[in-house]
Image (cartoon, rainbow, N blue to C red):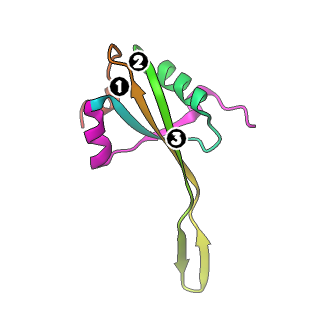
């Protein structure tokens, strides 16, 4: 297992209509490192965003899609998505406030 630091775990937030609607329930969606565990994701969110308390973390492994360009056939990279649920007394994450 790779030694992943907390600042390498979260790659970017997922900004979709479904993830924006889930923010009302204090659920935030991120693309994360493919080798990251739920405990590492929880620690990374709490360290990167001050005042947040993570209640639960749900993860999904997404396989790469088949792509074709001419005769060359390949796959896109695998990704991992995490839905982080915060506690009721936790502060909101600032990245999503302006969206």
Instruction: Measure the alpha-carbon separation of dots 2 and 1.
Output: 7 Å
Marks 2,1: beta carbons within 8 A: yes
State the SS at label 1: loop
State the SS at label 3: strand
For the record, the magenta segment spans 1-24
Tell which circle, 2 or 1, labels the residue nearer the N-terminal end: 2
Is 93 situated above or below 81?
above
The residue mark sitting in front, 1 or 3, is 3
- Neighbor class of circle 3 (other Cα within 10 Å; few <14, some 14-19, many 20+) is some
**Horizontal and vertical percent for residue 23?**
29, 34
The residue mark sitting in front, 3 or 2, is 3
Question: Measuring 45% from the left and 22% from the top, which residue is drawn there?
Answer: 54
Label disc, if present, on residue 52 of the rendered structure? 2
Marks 3,2: beta carbons within 8 A: no
Is 3 situated above or below 65?
above
**Horizontal and vertical percent for residue 87?**
38, 19
Number of numbered discs on residues: 3
Question: Measuring 25% from the left and 40% from the top, which residue is drawn there?
Answer: 21
**Nearer-the-camera pick, 7 or 43:** 43
Question: Measuring 55% from the left and 22% from the top, which residue is drawn there?
Answer: 43
Point out the residue furthest to the right here: 1
Label disc, if present, on residue 93 of the rendered structure? 1
- Neighbor class of circle 2 (other Cα within 10 Å; few <14, some 14-19, many 20+) is some
Residue 63, by quadrant, is bottom right
* Magenta stretch holds residue 3: yes
In the image, 48: left or right of 38?
Answer: left
């Amino acid at each position: 297992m790779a030694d992943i630091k907390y600042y390498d775990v979260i790659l970017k937030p997922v900004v979709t209509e479904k993830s924006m609607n889930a923010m009302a329930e204090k659920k935030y969606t991120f693309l994360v490192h493919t080798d990251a565990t739920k405990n590492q994701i929880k620690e990374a969110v709490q360290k990167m965003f001050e005042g947040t308390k993570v209640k639960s973390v749900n993860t999904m492994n997404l396989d790469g899609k088949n792509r074709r360009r001419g005769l060359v056939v390949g796959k896109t990279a695998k990704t991992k998505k995490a839905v982080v649920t915060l506690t009721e007394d936790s502060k909101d994450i600032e990245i999503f406030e302006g969206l």
